Amino acid sequence: MEWPLDSLDAVGFDLDYTLWDQEAFIRTFFDAIAVEFGRRLGWGGPHLARICRDTLLRIGPAHPRLFDQVLQQLGAWDPRLVAELVQRYRRHRPPVQPYPDALPALRRLREAGMRLFLVTDGHAPVQRYKAEALGLVPWFDQMVFTGDFAEERRKPSPFPFRLACARMGVDPGRCAYVGDNPACDVPGPRSLGMLTVGVATGPFAAAGAPGPAPHLRLGALGELAGLLAGAPARSAP
């Protein structure tokens, strides 16, 4: 299926697992806290780090109770410790890198005259740090961090997508949205008439992941270049 580029004015993106490997962020956090928390819990740091990585692989980094699961695995669950881990995680600031094909994909879209926007869930200060540290901010006309809003206005609600379009002054029906998680990244954009594009990266890479199927599905962002091949360049608005 060809991407009808001439019918689009803007392309939006999810952040985690779409433009970069969120799991790498979590792994660096586990490595950073392993020695301290291992000592506090009576475990060696390497052992704790291994338990954390094994739990991450078993339940997936998108699990909403990842730290609960880790502590339960250790027989050390405590709500105060979970809260401390969450707060430490939100302050974690490791060096990060986008997927190798992410910035070239954004550049190619810019060259084709597209406006670009970002809609991402998660704790807003952490997501802002990621966007800045990944070097993504200069590429986007609008960035919507849904953690700034009440839960009912986050994905899969159409609200953040509608907001991004309103800020750019573009018709949602002339936009596409690219994301990795069908359950979060398809319903909202599709309800507004956007073209939905799935990218098979991260924990939802396997076909048949829960959620509605996107209109198009890519193996990686690098395939955007193939979809754009032969499309005439347009002047950026």
Image: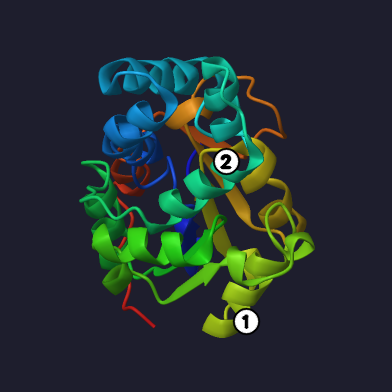
Q: Would you call the spot at circle 1 few (<14 residues within 10 Å), some (14-19), or many (20 or more)? A: few
Q: In front: 120, or 123?
A: 123
Residue indicated by mark 1: 166
Q: CA distance from mark 1 to mark 2?
A: 38 Å
Q: Is residue 140 left or right of residue 183?
A: left
Can residue 112 be seen in the rendering of this structure?
yes
Tag in front: 1 or 2: 2
Q: Quadrant of residue 36?
A: top left
Q: Is residue 49 left or right of residue 172?
A: left
Give the x, y percent position of residue 2.
Answer: 48, 41
Q: Residue at x 69, y 60 (%)?
A: 154
Going from N to C along the chain, the mark reached first, 1 or 2, is 2
Q: Quadrant of residue 132?
A: bottom left
Secondary structure at badge 1 equals helix
Q: Is residue 212 above or below residue 130?
A: above
Residue indicated by mark 2: 82
Q: In front: 157, or 104?
A: 157
Give the x, y percent position of residue 67.
Answer: 54, 34
Q: Would you call the spot at circle 2 few (<14 residues within 10 Å), some (14-19), or many (20 or more)? A: some
Q: Is residue 210 above or below residue 115?
A: above
Q: Is residue 70 left or right of residue 131?
A: right
Q: Residue at x 60, y 65 (%)?
A: 146
What is the number of the mark on residue 33?
none
Q: Residue at x 55, y 55 (%)?
A: 122
Q: Amino acid at mark 1?
A: Ala
